[in-house]
Amino acid sequence: QVQLVESGGGLVQTGGSLRLSCAASTNIFSITVMGWYRQAPGKQRELVASITNSGNTNYADSVKARFAISRRTGANTVYLQMNSLRPEDTAVYYCNAKKLSVDYWGQGTQVTVSS
């Protein structure tokens, strides 16, 4: 089983930056894919960015060139650096880990971008 703990959300103005962190309870090299998803009120949860255990990254079109996913293997932590934030980025952000065909989720962290 994998436990995920997110941190770093908050309130920021348009154009600002935030960095989200997701600490995993296990060696992240044992996790096939780690990712960040978000869910805005009344909308479906959507993939924001992901990184495989080999380091390949993937981004939603809406965040390309603004967000960057990275990892610190020694700390078993994945980060999401979010720059040039927009009001439409407002959502609850969830960390996800896929291991042996099982999905694990963090509790979510709120990101609010004011206009």
Image: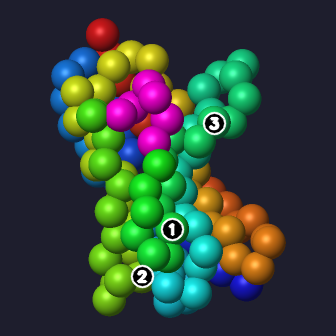
- What residue did someone put label 3 on? 46
Q: Secondary structure at mark 3?
A: strand
Residues at discs 1 and 2 in contact (Cβ within 8 Å): no
- What residue did someone put label 2 on? 76
Observer-nearest residue: 109 or 66?
66
Name the quadrant of the C terminus.
top left
Earlier sequence position, callout 3 versus callout 1: 3
Residue 91: x and y in percent read 53, 31
- Mark 1 → mark 2, Cα distance in angstroms: 13 Å
- Mark 3 → mark 1, Cα distance in angstroms: 17 Å
Three-letter amino acid code at disc 2?
A: Asn
Which residues lie in the magenta part? 59-64
- What residue did someone put label 1 on? 52
- Please give the name of the residue rendered at 34% of the width and 70% of the height, measured from the top-left corner: 71
- Please give the name of the residue rendered at 58% of the width and 87% of the height, measured from the top-left corner: 30
**On screen, residue 86 above or below 32:** above
Side of 43 relative to 96 (left or right): right
**On screen, residue 88 above or below 100:** above
- Mark 2 → mark 3, Cα distance in angstroms: 23 Å
Name the quadrant of the N terminus.
bottom right
Residue at the top extreme, as displayed: 115
Q: Secondary structure at mark 1?
A: strand
Q: Is residue 37 visible?
A: yes
User: How dense is the environment of label 1, judged by Cα within 10 Å: few (below 14), some, or many (20 and up)?
Assistant: some
